[in-house]
Amino acid sequence: MKKNWLLLSVIFAVMFVLAACNNADKDSAKTDDGNKDKSSQTADNKVDTNALPMEVTNEGDVIKGGTLQVALVTDSPFKGIFIEELSDDAYDSKIMEYASNSLFELDGDFQVKDTGIAKLEVDKDNKKAKITIQGDVKWSDGKPLTAEDLIYPYEIIGHPDYSGVRYDDDFQNIVGAQEYHDGKSKTISGIKKIDEKSIEITFKKVSPAIYSVGDGLWGYAAPKHQLESIPVKDALIASDAVRKNPVTLGAFKIDKIVNGESVQLVANEHYFKGKPKLDKVVIEVVPSTSIGEAMKTGKYDIAHQYPTNQYDGIKDLSNISVLSRPELSYSYVGFKLGKYDKTSSKNIYNEKSKMNDANLRQAIAYAMDIESVTEKFYQGLRVRANSLIPPVFASYYDDTLEGYHYDPEKAKELLDKAGYKDKDGDGIREDKDGKKFTIRLAAMSGSDTDEAIAEYYRQNWKDVGLNVELTTGRLIEFNSFYDKVKADDPEIDMFMAAWKTGTNPSPAGLYSDGAEFNFSRFVSADLTKMLEDIDSEKAMDPKFRSEAFRTWQVYMSEQATTIPMYFRTEIVPVNKRVKNYNVDYANATELQNIELTADAPVK
């Protein structure tokens, strides 16, 4: 049975290679510089993303209340850590959007506006920020939101026993945060309570990032009355207050949880914008292999994290509308170049690491036929990325950067230059010392096509003489994958992953010395200076900041420690019984306003 399965996998992968390598098709889809020609986006096998709406309005009288059925598309169970200070999982975060403790609302440019739970006032001259609760806001248990709840998240993240990923260089920008974390102070000296509804934070520097909830500013409240008696070390992350009955501020509150499988939420009568029109929201994990059929048969109203390579299966369904928007994310290939030291909260770069050769990394990038993968599997919903800044951040994304287009001959030249040569004539290159050279790749399992795509890239690399094998011998389940990557598993030389950037374009949280999310573990004095420039006081000048972003993007491309693969378009299938739904970042539907026109999703 195992042999048959492997044979089928190989056959499928080979079929893909034959299809993807059709030279005539490839040539027609590229311009002279290797980038996709814009006209190809409207070819028969492509989606014209400009034609996909961001909003749908369905006819019909609304019913009173009702239950919104939501699919969370993933092939892994969600972790169930329902507190932002400790969570680092995209699926948990998606669930928490319905019960969010977010203090601020953002405009279409991802800048804080005054319509949220709290108001932000920045005194850039004195490097201070004032956060004020607007009105009489209550937690889902009826307790009032207070200034203590604004301070408590900082005390969790900065705590000496904190084991999460949020304590980083950005957080240390708060005056006194490092002393508190090191146990030298019992409080964070730079955070002061002004009155019952407002606090003041003093920073070491203030930059434009603060207006996108950066510079160390934290965008969430935490219910101190529920959490303060729970030790931060080990106990908090395992507590019922985090796992079973979190007290929240969002439009809905968590009612029932089936671990890893589903969450039922009910309307929060204390929501600061008024009780939602829906009675309930039920969120269920749905495997990528079955979500298309589930939407077709009317099992769900909305699907989050819908796999773009399955767009063809739903595009013509009469019972749904397909909405789209550019994702605040990118896919990438990363290389392991060191370790993260928990004691010092620093990334330790190892210059002697196996993959520490820029020519090798660049060759790996040039060898990848990303253009064909986006064309054959993603129908234009993903395109080759040229930068680590998504285009949705228009002020900072640089569309003049070339990035790494498919050029196997260039890859071979770089490998020869770096000393990786085939010395025994078997078609596979040895390392610089003439020894056998194998690169171990970690990649995530998911949809049916993920294995074929990984095998195609492995063939790309073999074509230029590199032997790339899968860590563990197979694709790795989502949660296990990130556990291994975060732990700097020695069996991983490079890995394929993706970042959701959030609404703050600053790369400091992903690439700085103290960022645990800096999974490549690459650090340098030049990189530190560039990140500091992006989030410096000088960056209050838009021209200076834009140039600082470009300098960083060029540098990261040259270093090739993290290679951007795809920019992504998010698609959101919405059943036609949902009255109005808008995914535009500037005008997204607010959860308390969602209404339904029937008792069950339309089939």
Image (tube, rainbow, N blue to C red):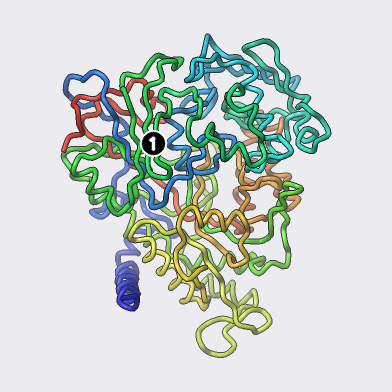
Dividing the picture into quadrants, the one containing residue 573 is: top left
* Residue 394 shows up from this direction: no
- Image height check: is 197 above or below 488? above
- Image height check: is 263 above or below 5? above
Horizontal and vertical percent position of residue 207: 67, 30
How many C-alpha atoms fall within 10 Å of the one at disc 1: few (<14), some, or many (≥20)? many
Horizontal and vertical percent position of residue 217: 64, 28
Q: Residue at x 53, y 61 (%)?
A: 495
SS of the residue at dot 1? strand
Task: State the residue in front, 563 or 483.
Answer: 483
Task: State the residue in front, 152 or 468.
Answer: 152
Q: Residue furthest right?
A: 184
Horizontal and vertical percent position of residue 472: 50, 68
- Image height check: is 35 above or below 327? below
Horizontal and vertical percent position of residue 222: 58, 26
Q: Residue at x 32, y 53 (%)?
A: 309
Dividing the picture into quadrants, the one containing residue 591 is: top left
Residue type at the position of mark 1 = Val
Indicate the quadrant containing the C terminus: top left, top right, bottom left or bottom right.
Answer: top left
* Residue 169 shows up from this direction: yes
For residue 139, side relative to residue 449 (left or right): right
Residue at mark 1: 263
Q: Residue at x 80, y 36 (%)?
A: 183
For residue 160, side relative to residue 417 (left or right): right
Q: Residue at x 69, y 67 (%)?
A: 353
